[in-house]
Image (cartoon, rainbow, N blue to C red):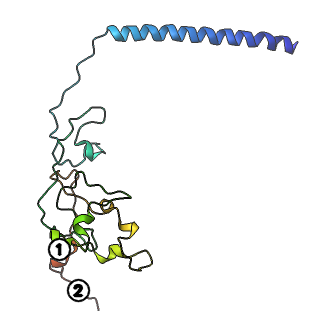
Amino acid sequence: MDKRKLLLAIPLALLLGALLFFLGWLLGRGLAAADKDRVPAPQASSAPVDARAVFIPGNGQIDAIRRGVPVDQEGHPPPMARVENTDIKRVRAYPMQPPTIPHAVDGYQVDRNSNRCMLCHARANAATFQAPPVSVTHYMDRDDQFLAAISPRRYFCMQCHVVQTDAPTLVASGFRDIDSLLAEPAEAAPAEVH
C-alpha cells in the first residue's frame, strides 16, 4: 500500500513543480515587459566631484579612492598624472628608502635580456652621462659576495625605484620623517615622585 502512495506522490510532485515553474516564468515575463514600458525616474544628480581633490572618507564612505562618489554611481576619472621630469635628486623620507627616479622612463626596456637603466647608471657609464652610479649593494648576492655584474635580485629597477608624478594625494597622511620628529623640542619630563 505504501508503495502505491509513493508512486502516486512522485508524479504529483513533479507536476506541481512544473506548474510552479511555468507560473513563475509567466510572471517574470510580465514584470520584465512592465519594466520596459516604464520610464525610469531621474536620479538625484550631484555636482561632479573634482577628480584631483583630496578626499578624507566620512559619512559612511569606506573607499577614499572613489573621491566621494557613492559606490552605486560612476565618477569621472581623473586626468592622467604627468611624470615629473626635473632630473633633481629628491630627499628621502626615511633611512634606506630607494631613491625615486627624477625623470620619465616611458619606453625603457628592462627585461631578461636588456636593462635600459644601466646604460646611464652602470658604474662604467655614470660619469659620462652624469648619472648617479648604482650602489655597490646592487652588485652583491644574497650571501653578500660581490659580483662582476648587477645581482639578479636587483636587476629589475622599477620594483623598488619609482617615478614621481604631479598626481594629488588621494588620502591625507600624517607621515613625518625622523628628522622632523627629532627636531621637535622635548616635552617637559614629568616630575619624579619620591
Task: Read off the residue under disc 1.
Answer: 127
Identify whether 174 is placed above or below 22.
Answer: below
Disc on res. 82? none
Q: Residue at x 25, y 59 (%)?
A: 162
Instruction: Assign the N terminus to one quadrant of the image.
Output: top right
Q: Nearer the viewer, mark 1 or mark 2?
A: 1
Q: Position of residue 88 (x, y in %)?
A: 12, 65
Identify whether 175 is placed above or below 44.
Answer: below
Residue toward you, 142 or 181: 142
Q: Residue at x 16, y 34 (%)?
A: 48
Q: Position of residue 16 (x, y in %)?
A: 65, 10
Identify whether 66 is placed above or below 149.
Answer: above
Task: Read off the residue under disc 2.
Answer: 191
> Looking at numbered disc 1 in the image, what kind of residue is underneath it?
Ala
Q: Residue at x 80, y 12 (%)?
A: 7
> Looking at numbered disc 2 in the image, what kind of residue is underneath it?
Ala
Residue toward you, 145 or 20: 145
